[in-house]
Image (spheres, rainbow, N blue to C red):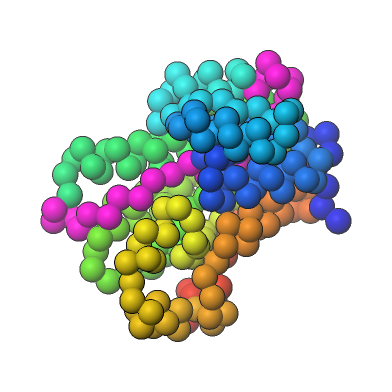
Amino acid sequence: MIRLDGKTVLVTGGATGFGAASARIARELGAQVAIAGRREDRGRDAASALGPDVLFIPADVSQERDVVRMLSAVQHRFGRLDVLINNAGMIHRVPLAQDDVAGWDALMATNLRGVFLCCKHALPMLTATRGAIVNVSSVLAFASRPGGRSTAYDASKAGVLALTRSVAVAHGPAGVRCNAVCPGFVMTEMTRDLWEKWSQQERDAFLQAYPLRRMGTAEDMAQAIIFLASDAASWITGQTLIVDGGQLATL
């Protein structure tokens, strides 16, 4: 059985979706948990729901000063960091021909620079504990949807995979593991609005692309994330775990 007793886990974007589910499971498995996010009201509510000992840190991972402050808060409260889950991200659905530099830069700042900054500043703490990083990417790092409405997003998530591999190779000798998960279309706050705009016929047609014929859940993703974060994956690094109900297997 996977346990996280004695470990400290930090989850960015930890107030909702995969992040909230990962934080909850980590807490249930015995970890000390900190969650970070931009929305202070939502973050404090999420932390409170998990228990009085769960730390919420308001932080924008695209801003280096916030990342430094976030990790200092973890060090001050818990004295260590064993697992970093880089879950914070945003979606930017604009066709390439209509996109602009501001939109591209804003997305890259959160989805890619944010992962870089968190890895960079967490590495001293993770080296001390021989800890683990789990980065959340996407199946869109491998295959893009027709219509070209997620070009910047796809590029950012592909960058996360290259960053994951590089961190794993560079810091594996110090005992730090770094892996990524690639979700398919999972029902979260970010995707629910899109799903609710579709007709039942459109939904049924969409699910035909998934051999398991169902949407993923935040719980599905969190279980995969926690596995990679745990000692059960102690000889796994530099890898990408695709969690997509079999969608990519059909392409």
Is 201 on the left-hand or right-hand side of 164?
left
Q: Residue at x 46, y 65 (%)?
A: 185
Whether residue 214 is situated above or below residue 108 in the rendered picture: below
Expressed as whole percent of the image width and height from the top left, the position of residue 152 reads 29, 51
The residue at the point 41 percent across, 53 percent down is 190
- Kindly identify the residue that appears in the image at 55 percent across and 66 percent down: 216
Q: Position of residue 125 (x, y in %)?
A: 67, 25
Quadrant location of the N terminus? bottom right
Picture coordinates of residue 213 (x, y %)?
A: 53, 80
Q: Is residue 183 left or right of residue 46?
A: left
Residue 135 showing in the rendered view: no
User: What is the tally of numbered marks visible in this picture?
Assistant: 0
Say which quadrant the C terminus sits in. Answer: bottom left
Question: Residue 148: where, in percent of width, then height?
Answer: 24, 64
Asked if residue 146 is positioned above or below residue 218 in the image, the reply reads below
Q: Is residue 168 left or right of residue 115?
A: right
Q: Nearer the viewer, residue 164 or 199?
A: 199
Asked whether the viewer can see residue 113, the reply is yes
- Residue 153 lies within the magenta run: no
Q: Over which residues does the magenta segment extend?
A: 74-98
Q: Nearer the viewer, residue 171 or 97?
A: 97
Q: Nearer the viewer, residue 245 or 171?
A: 245
Residue 129 figure quarter: top right
Picture residue at 68% right of the left edge, 57% below the top? 223
